[in-house]
Structure formats: C-alpha cells, structure tokens
Image (cartoon, grey):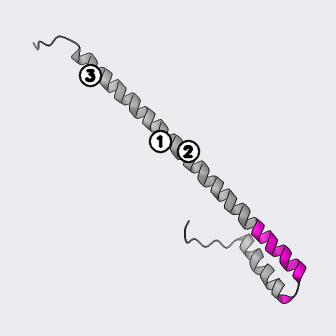
Amino acid sequence: MVGKIDLSFPEILLFCGTWILTSGNFGLGVSMCALGLTGAVFRAALRMHQAQLEEQARQNLLKEMNNAGEELGQAIMSLFKGAGSGSANVH
C-alpha cells in the first residue's frame, strides 16, 4: 500500500472545496473540505480494521498449523515407541 495514490470521493471533495474556498464561497468550501477529511479518516479506519482482521486470521492459521504439527509429531513418536518396545532379538 505504500506509494499508492488513491483518488476517490474524499480527495475530490477536498480539491473542489479548496477551489471553492479560493473562489470566495467560504461556507460551501469549508463544508466540502470537512466532508472530504471525514471521508478520508473513515476510509483509513476501515483499512486499518481490515488489516487487523487479516493479521488475526493469519495468526489463527499459524496456531492451527502448529497444533497440527505437534499432533503429527506425537503420532510419529508413538509409532516409533510402539515398534521399539518389542524384543531386542532380531530374527
């Protein structure tokens, strides 16, 4: 996401609001700039929340894989222990 330029509704509102402010219509310009800033903050919050959910899902997957690996290791160890518990004499 670094270096990505996002030109969507909040940026357009900021651009147009700034243009209108410089043209002399103070009320409309401030309203559009405020809406643009609010939209940009909400979008950033949603992206951060999505990134947190993805990281949480990744951590859960790693935990499940670790548990499966431990169970597989225990099963293999029990097989080898079972095979070695017999008589030491080879026929």
The residue singled out by tag 3 in the image is 80
What amino acid type is highlighted by mark number 2?
Ala
The residue singled out by tag 1 in the image is 62
Q: Residue furthest left?
A: 91
Q: Quadrant of residue 57?
A: top right
Q: Residue at x 11, y 12 (%)?
A: 89
Q: Residue at x 39, y 31 (%)?
A: 70
Q: Are marks 3 and 2 in contact (CB under 8 Å)?
A: no
What amino acid type is highlighted by mark number 1?
Leu
Q: Quadrant of residue 79?
A: top left
In the image, 25: left or right of 9? Answer: right
Magenta range is: 23-38
Q: Residue at x 88, y 78 (%)?
A: 28
Which corner quadrant holds the C terminus? Answer: top left
Badge 2 marks a residue whose secondary structure is helix
The residue singled out by tag 2 in the image is 57
Image location (x, y in percent) of residue 62: 47, 42
Above or below residue 17? Residue 60 is above
In the depicted view, which residue is nearer to us: 91 or 19? 19
Local crowd at mark 2 within 10 Å, few (<14), some, or many (≥20)? few
